[in-house]
Amino acid sequence: MANVSVAAEWQLLYDRYYRKPEIYQMKWKHVDLSRNKVACASFGGPIAVIRDDSKIVQLYAESALRKLRIFNSAGILLSETVWKHPGGRLIGMSWSDDQTLICIVQDGTIYRYNIHAELIEPNMSMGKECFEQNVVECVFWGNGVVCLTEGGQLICIFDFKTMKPSKLPDVPGLAEDDLLQPICLTVREPKYTMSGIAEVLVAVGDDIFVVEEDSVQTIRFDEPSIEDSEMQNDDSGNLIGVVQKMIVSPNGKFLTLFTHDGRIVVVDMETKQIAIDYCCESALPPQQMAWCGMDSVLLYWDEDLMMVGPVGDPVHYFYDEPVILIPECDGVRILSNTSLEFLQRVPDSTESIFKIGSTSPAALLYDALDHFDRRSAKADENLRLIRSSLSEAVESCIDAAGHEFDVTRQRALLRAASYGQAFCSNFQRERVQETCRTLRVLNAVRDPAIGIPLSIQQYKLLTPVVLISRLINAHCHLLALRISEYLDMNKEVVIMHWACAKITASPSTPDSHLLEILLDKLQLCKGISYAAVATHADNCGRRKLAAMLVEHEPRSTKQVPLLLSIGEEDTALVKATESGDTDLVYLVIFHIWQKRPPLEFFAMIQGRVLARDLFVAYARCHKHEFLKDFFLSTGQIHEVAFLLWKESWDMGKNPMASKGSPLHGPRIKLIEKARNLFSQTKEHTFESKAAEEHAKLLKIQHELEASTKQAIFVDSSINDTIRTCIVLGNNRAAMKVKTEFKVSDKRWYWLKAFALATIKDWAALEKFSKEKRPPMGFRPFVEACIDADEKAEALKYIPKLSDLVERGEAYARIGMAKEAADAAAQANDGGELLERFRKTFVQNAIFDTLKMPFQGAS
């Protein structure tokens, strides 16, 4: 009998059953759908209602002000606001995929609202064409809209996230003079097109055009493919005729057309074959058309809702009140003034159980449970009949339970599945548990107070993550939290959204008390971002609360930037230095640098070693002047001096600092300033003297370059300066440098000897050697000659070397083995030099010449 009562509610369309259970009795009062514009979101979403200003309606006990009201699917008011927007009549409104209400008025202005009827700024526009020509029709899809203007222009927004209007190509027949002929629009969503961009289908008279972003194409259809003669059209001419209304199927593969002669035609978009051609009783275009899943099409006229399938007679449903059709992926929700129903094809599993006279294994299992409850032996008989297909019967009961909205029937079907599972050892027992979890979630959100009547197929397509997101946006935080815990999902998103909403809704609650409330919940989730909640508090003007919240943020990378944004620079610097993250420290330093006066900035970083060292390292490379101010403010005069000295060297790298350039003057002044600063500290006497001599040397070198007109002196050493002067023959200048810098005679002899050898002035070198007894002997002369590879000149001075070891080594270097051996034999070094020469000359094949002297020496 139970099966009969369930199946009695079904309607047969050819060989397929459809059912239309009532989901809710609407809770609203005094809402007449015929007097209002209505926008219903998919997946059991909210319903937006506003009085239709294109109709003359009688006002009852209500204000003349138009109100935008938002209800849940059970008719419970969620929010409302007064509509005061300019721009002309409201042409169309619809919910986007993220449940933002999009409202388009006559001049193309777009107003956006969230589920709480709060206006989302800024308002957008469909563009100049819509403003000048006015919008006459809007067609929405999931995340976009196309508008038709009075001038026949098509303006499209392909994505509400970017809100960028695009003008589509002109369509033949949409010119201003041709608008008297029937025109209708529909859209094929981007996910079903080859290009990935929405296609706008425009019917103008007998023609149907596909309009893409940069092209317009005409669609032509072939002969009907069905065999039923009643479905054939005898007219061998135009098979379609003038189209008055059209829609695209949920999967984008079929196009449904209603023609001027009352025919409903369904066409395959890929093959262009006509799949359905049915002649309706009325030639008046239906007020609404919608697909019911993928199996049938619904057409609604006043009081008559007709469902047409591929073959067979249609099914009629009659209403004495206006209805709104809300397409879903697996059926259609039917909204009326008093109720919300869900029309869907009966699932195969449900049909196999409850169909009148069904003897399927699932029906016998369901019946066996009934007998078991009545303690009838027939229960065992039914189980024996289906033992071979018991797992199939259990699966059908589980699947049927998932598709039910009635909780009592869900429980009965799940009990039947559990009963059969007890006798089925190879069935996956997690399947029942999984379905129970899903149904508990669905039953919770289907409650009228929540009002989200999802079917199990819609739930799987929507996903639990999106469902939880919609719950928290509707401020159903407790239910969202319980579902997250029940499904082992991340609770952080729910708790954070609740915390932000709590801050927004508690403007008069003291910060300390509100902090306790927030921490009590935030601590439920480890690793939650306190910084994100603190940011929201700061945006709400609760800066003190934000500072208190951010103290609990364990991650410095999130804590420090927020502290800076709320003006807590001192705390931010402390946290950054404690973290040891140099990037964070630099972030704080640069922020404070821009915000605070220099002296205040210097005082902040002086006591923090890491911050100070990082600032100094950066400023040395990029901000010398600012670094000087820092060192002066902290009493580090010597550091300023080093900076000045470095600047003088950097100035010398300038290509202009040559050939007597005036840049030498500033360089010398910088060095003299550095010397003065060094002289003020007892610890830097050496640096002071070095700077003084550096300045003196630069002056002399600058004078030399000016006199010789050769840029070869500046920034060379004292030795190089003397050597260069001698090479150039300017002995007077060389002596001046020697005297100014107190160059010792020993160094002088070395420098002059090598300089004269460089220019191969051997006569001058010999004369120089005879001026007086050289302080280091004649070794500089020997070395200079050998270095110049002049053996003959070297022989003039080698015999004058008093040190026999030096003399022997000199002979050896110019290849005079015998003389080297004689000198080594006379040297009183224990034969060490002689032995070294033996090894050296053996390698050079000169051992024979050294043999006798070596033997004599031994």
Image (spheres, grey):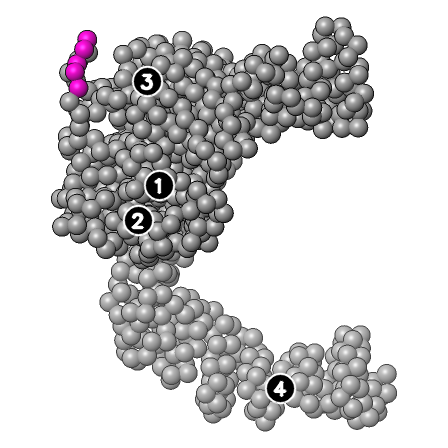
| Residue 635 found in image quarter | top left
Q: How crowded is mark 2: few (under 14 residues within 10 Å), some or many (20 or more)?
A: some
Residue at 17 percent of width and 46 percent of height: 179
Reading the chain from its start, which is encountered first: label 4 or label 3?
A: 3
Q: Where is residue 797 in the image (x, y as percent from the top left)?
A: 59, 87
State yes or no: residue 58 in magenta.
yes
- Residue under label 4, please give it: 798
Residue at 51 percent of width and 33 percent of height: 14
Q: In this view, does 106 lie to the left or right of 818?
A: left
Q: Nearer the viewer, mark 4 or mark 1?
A: 1
- Residue under label 1, please give it: 263
Q: In this view, does 845 lie to the left or right of 521?
A: right
Q: Which of 828 and 190 is in front in this view?
A: 190
Write down the region rendered in magenta.
57-61
Q: Which of 553 and 703 is in front in this view?
A: 553
Q: SS at mark 3?
A: loop
As shown in the figure, which amino acid type bears the numbered disc 3?
A: Asp
Q: Where is residue 524 in the image (x, y as percent from the top left)?
A: 54, 17
- Residue under label 3, please give it: 320
State yes or no: residue 215 in magenta.
no
Q: Is residue 357 left or right of residue 12?
A: right
As shown in the figure, which amino acid type bears the numbered disc 1?
A: Arg
Q: In the rendered view, would you say 363 is above or below 130? A: above
Q: Distance between the residues labelled 2 and 4?
A: 123 Å
Reading the chain from its start, which is encountered first: label 2 or label 4?
A: 2
- Residue under label 2, please give it: 241
